[in-house]
Amino acid sequence: MGEPLRVGAIDDDRFDRSKRVGWLDLGSVLRANVLMIGAGAIGNEVAKDLALSGFRRIKIVDMDHVVGSNLNRCLFFTPDDAKARTSKAEAVARGIRAQSPDAQPIAVVDRIENLGESVFGEADVVLGCLDNIQARIHANSHAYLAGRPYIDGGMEGFVGKVMVTRPPDGACLQCGMNRSHAKVASLRFSCTGKDVVFHEPRLAAEVTTTSIIAAIMVREALKVVSGKVEMCLSNAFYYDGQRNVSEEYEVAVDPNCTVHLKI
Amino acid sequence: MVVRIKVKNAETGATVEMELEMENTIDEVIESAATFWSKDMGAYVLRKGKKVLRGGSNLNDVGIRADDVLELIPDPEGG
């Protein structure tokens, strides 16, 4: 015999409402290893949604620290973090722990490019919450080569995009890129003659679009770990909050995509 | 062969008519349209209907015809 039934016990169960979603495999969610790359605005919202959804094993990679201008859209950052220059990964890990005492977030204060290949292979799903094309290309290709689903989110102002890459099927993030992406990526790095400098543009950003993009990313992660890949986005999802538009665009496999050519 | 198409700016709704050779690439169309609208340096994609057009393809490859309307949409980089 298990625990005796108590009146009202159902409302004590943190995940009772999640269990009512027929296709959701909560056990897999609780056990899944998530790699979250980037702990900025999208990263904060993704972390919140992961923790509330039941994800516990979350590795957060970000080399940056909190600044005051992050505070218009980052739930887990405080003015004290900005003063203390707290690392973003650590602030997000702290936020996850506060929200979900059973969670075991691991903060890695480093660039994803400096970590070994195994960090991708250890994950059941990889979430790209990045702010530059170079890092996206790195995350996309390494997740693809490790055979791990990669969910990428991006935003600027009231426009956002989510793309799910599910190796070995379909297009990857890089298949949808063109010369304008290469140009932007090259501009972010400039050589001063002495060193290579990373230029971070100040892009328009606000929390409502961030929340929408992050929510879609975590919704797709729930489908991936629940084994419902047939329900996943198979194309790019675009959102434009100024025009009140959201739609899916088709991205075909690029036969010249260097990621696909490596397989 | 020369064709005239329209490119729509998704952010403003403005449209520009372009005269193109079938050998012109999607990358070239994106660059010309972004420059015409003096867009900030950023990544953009061009779509026809629901399909995102591959940058290196020429108009012939992707089946562009006279009077087609393509849409230039930003590919947001921020996070």
Image: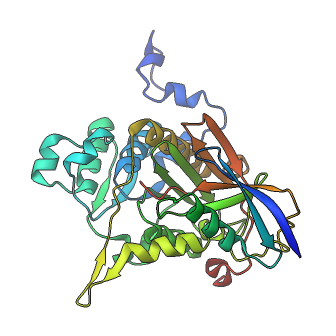
In screen coordinates, is A86 left or right of A134? left
Q: Note whether A166 is above or below A4 in the view shown.
A: below
Q: Note whether A200 is above or below A30 in the view shown.
A: below
In screen coordinates, is A142 left or right of A74? right
Residue at 10 percent across and 52 percent down: it is: A84
Q: How is the image coloured?
A: rainbow
The percent position of residue B6, horizontal first and vertical second, equals 76, 56
The percent position of residue A3, horizontal first and vertical second, equals 45, 23
The answer to whether residue A149 shows anywhere in this view is no
- Front-lying residue, B62 or A43: B62
The percent position of residue A94, horizontal first and vertical second, equals 24, 46
The percent position of residue A23, horizontal first and vertical second, equals 66, 37
**Which residue is most to the top?**
A7
Q: How many marks?
A: 0
Quadrant placement of the C terminus of chain A: bottom right
The answer to whether residue B17 shows anywhere in this view is yes
Q: Quadrant of residue A187?
A: bottom left
**Which residue is most to the bottom?**
A193
Residue at 59 percent across and 44 percent down: it is: B12
- Front-lying residue, A96 or A210: A210
Q: Note whether A3 is above or below A162 in the view shown.
A: above
Q: Quadrant of residue A244?
A: top right
